[in-house]
Amino acid sequence: MPGRSMPVLPSLMGLTPPDAAWLPGEGIDPASLPEAVPGEVVEMADGDTLRITAMRVRRTIRGQTLIMYGFNGQYPGPLIKVDRDATIYVHFSNEIDLPSTIHWHGVRVDNRFDGVPAVTQEPVEPGESFLYEVHLPDAGIYWYHPHVRTEIQQDLGLYGNIMVRHPAADYFNPVNREQVLILDDLLLDERGIFPYGAEGATQALMGRFGNLLLVNGEPEYRLQVSRGEVVRFFLTNVSNTRTFNLSFGGAPMKLVGADIGRFEREEMVESVPIGPAQRYIVEVYFREPGEYRFANRIQAIDVFRGEFYPRNDTLGIVSVVDEPASEDHSAVFERLREHPTVVSEIDAYRKQFERPVDHEIVMSVRVGELPGIILNLMAIDTLYKPPVEFNDVMPMMNFLSSEKNVTWILRDPATGRENMDIHWRFEVGDVAKIRIFNDPRSFHPMQHPMHFHGQRFLVLARDGVPNDNLVWKDTVLVPVGSRVDILFEASNPGEWLAHCHILEHVEAGMKMVLSVIPAIDP
């Protein structure tokens, strides 16, 4: 991934992170491990059981042989396709060298099966197994990943999608084909995978940015279509930290859905910003033959030179051959549908949109014993406060940070409590307005993708500007300095985690718990 190199200052030479380095499979010959294979599609019906094993695998990427992880030895893990309202069973076996779990991201699953150690279940130790029961009440695109040392296990390949289909044949527009794309990045050096922290997350300040961009686990995505095809893409960002800004080489693109289903109405967009853990559904019309670059187009920042600069990284190529599509869906593509069923469902909540704010969260950070040169350089860094940090602006400073000297904070200003000392309480059926403020005055302000387990919400407004096209969400990207108001629906009883989905940030403390208890009859 080409880019500008940051100078290494002499005062930083010789400094090391405050934690020992760790890599998977130390002392194991990679040749002794099975070679990973591309992920398979698994069709499941109500009551079916799938066996999923987390295992060490061998992968060769750009000529380097790497020890990584894979669900069932695949990259990504199996794509599960299932109908709405089905209940499936997943027999999970852990054969990696760390305790693990599976979290069903975005699914309003029974609390016992949410996969969060110390909140919903004990970790699954190496050599052990656990049976998950997963009920899928909402159509949409979801994903699954571990919730133990997630910044390692997910980064090394433990992730996969779940496509939950709606029973209505016209739920989505007719298209020529569908593609499920998982976006990721991987941090490599000349020796292979850049090490993680043995005792806790490293690169805790900005999070772990990779230098190789991946689509479905591969560095070069390829798709061939015919002239005039409309393709529906289901997009999921599983990277530790990176926010992407996606486009298809100028091909017209229509935004139709997000985390939990469809928007109230479809709209044409030039690009789709997608933070970690978020999902978006777009339809793209490839009108003319040629090659279209599936790209990550961003405004990067160079702190040392004091300037922003454009980056346009190619994630893959869509080749359009000069033969007509088997079916012409162009007229449907040009029409922007409004979805009365989505509108009417949300109508039941509109009277709550103007209610007072019930709870607030302030996002901030606290640092401990960082080297003095880092503290001085960070003073320069905070002169530039981009709303979204699309690239690792100070990689050497990030390299020297860990959860031992950086604590990321969710603060409840009403009580002063922080992180796991916060414990909000709701009853099933409650609706609450929650305001999330990303404090730009913190030591290193950056965006945070805030994820609520087991529930859903609507993004009502950003910085006081109402959102006029709503969709049910489970993760919202909060830019630096922004205030985001969400309408939170408490529908699923249990103890639930809420956290930033920059994985190094959650490991460094940025998480809280909320309780949803069954409604008490009057």
Image (cartoon, grey):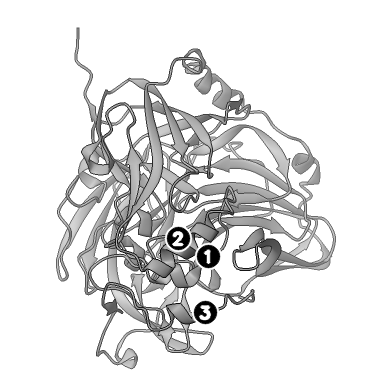
Indicate which disc, 3 or 2, sits on the residue closer to the N terminus: 3
Q: Estimate the x, y position of residue 45 in percent, counting from the top left.
A: 37, 48
Residue 184, horizontal then vertical, whole percent: 50, 65
Give the class, few, some or many, for how many residues have Cα within 10 Å of label 3's Cα (few <14, many ≥20). few
Instruction: Give 441 or 58, whichever is nearer the viewer.
Output: 441
- Any mark on residue 392, and which? 1
Observer-nearest of 369 and 1: 369
Q: Amino acid at mark 1?
A: Asp
Element at label 1: loop
Mark 1 burial class by Cα count in 10 Å: few <14, some 14-19, many 20+: many
Query: Disc 3 on helix, strand or loop?
Result: loop
- Which residue is label 3 attached to? 8
Q: Are marks 1 and 2 in contact (CB under 8 Å)?
A: yes
Taking the spot 53% from the left edge, 40% from the top edge, the residue there is 481
Residue at left offset 19%, top offset 45%: 119
Which residue is disc 2 drawn over? Answer: 206
Amino acid under label 3?
Val
Q: Residue at x 76, y 46 (%)?
A: 329
In the rendered image, the quadrant that contains the C terminus is top left
Given contact means CB atoms under 8 Å apart, are the residues at marks 3 and 2 in contact? no
Q: x%, y% of residue 262? A: 56, 36
Cα separation between marks 3 and 2: 17 Å
